[in-house]
Amino acid sequence: MNRYLHSRRKRALDLAVAVPLLVVSAPVVGLAALAVRLESSGHPIYKQRRVGLEGHAFEVYKLRTMVSGAEHMGAGMAVDAGDARITRIGAILRRTSIDELPNLWNILKGEMSLVGPRPTIQVQVDQYTDRQRRRLSVRPGLTGWAQINGRASLPWSERIELDLVYLERASLRLDLRIIVLSARMAVTGHGLYRGETGGWRG
C-alpha cells in the first residue's frame, strides 16, 4: 500500500485546505441552504449513508439538490441531466459543485479526505470484486482521480479502475494537482451527469 495514503502529510493537507475553506464558504452554504428550503419542502442538508474506510458506514453531508424523497422516485439513485427531480436551485448547486461543500465536515471528522475515491453506497460495494474492494482501503474523497478524468460520465467500472490507479500513484504533488483541476471543473461542470454510458446502473 502506498504509504502516503495514510500519512500525516495527507491528513495535514486535508486540514490545511478544509478548515479555511469551511470558514470562507460558510456564507455561501448558508445562503444556498436558505434558497433550497424556500424552493422546496424538506431539510436543506441531505444526509446519506455511505461506505468509507475499511467498509465502515458513515453519514455524508450534502446540500439537497432534489425534491425530498427523490431516491425513492423515478430512477432511484441514478441521476441524469434534465432529471425532473432536480430543483432549479439544485441544478445550480450541482453545476457549481456547491452542493458538495458540506462534505468538508466529513473531512474534519476524519471520515473523508480531500482526495480519494468518492464514497459509494452499500449496494454498489456489495457488487465489488476483490480487486475493486481495494477502493475501501483509504478514506473516500471530496474529489479524486476519476473526477478529473470524466466524473460521472464514465462507465462505473472505468471510474473504479481510475481510483485504483490513484491508490498506486498517490502523492502530495498529485493530490495538489487533483485539487486544482477539480476547482477548474467546478467552474465548467464537465462530466457532471452520467450520460448514455456513464455511471452505475444497478
Image (tube, rainbow, N blue to C red):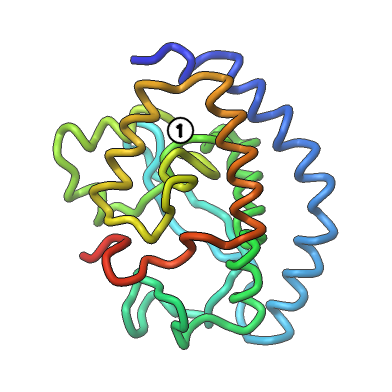
Question: At 40% across and 59% down in the image, what residue appears?
Answer: 152
The correct choice, above or below, for 157 with respect to 70 in the image is: above
Q: Nearer the viewer, residue 194 or 35?
A: 194
Instruction: Work out which quarter of the rendered image holds the N terminus and state it.
Output: top left
Query: In which quadrant of the rendered view does residue 9 lie?
Result: top right
Indicate the position of residue 3 as horizontal and vertical percent values: 43, 11
Residue type marked 1: Arg
Question: At 79% across and 64% down in the image, what residue appears?
Answer: 30
Residue 43 horizontal side relative to residue 17, left or right: left
Residue 45 horizontal side relative to residue 151, left or right: right
Indicate the position of residue 60 as horizontal and vertical percent values: 52, 52
Question: At 61% across and 36% down in the image, what residue appears?
Answer: 109
Indicate the position of residue 102 as horizontal and vertical percent values: 65, 53
Query: In which quadrant of the rendered view does residue 36 lie?
Result: bottom right
Look at the numbered disc 1 and give the secondary structure of its residue.
loop
Residue 160 horizontal side relative to residue 145, left or right: left
Question: At 83% across and 45% down in the image, what residue appears?
Answer: 23
Number of numbered discs on residues: 1
The correct choice, above or below, for 55 with respect to 94 in the image is: above
Question: Label 1 crowding class (10 Å Cα cut-off): few <14, some 14-19, many 20+?
Answer: many
The correct choice, above or below, for 59 with respect to 176 in the image is: below
Residue 118 horizontal side relative to residue 184, left or right: left
| Residue occupied by mark 1 | 139
Indicate the position of residue 39 as horizontal and vertical percent values: 69, 86
Instruction: Work out which quarter of the rendered image holds the C terminus and state it.
Output: bottom left
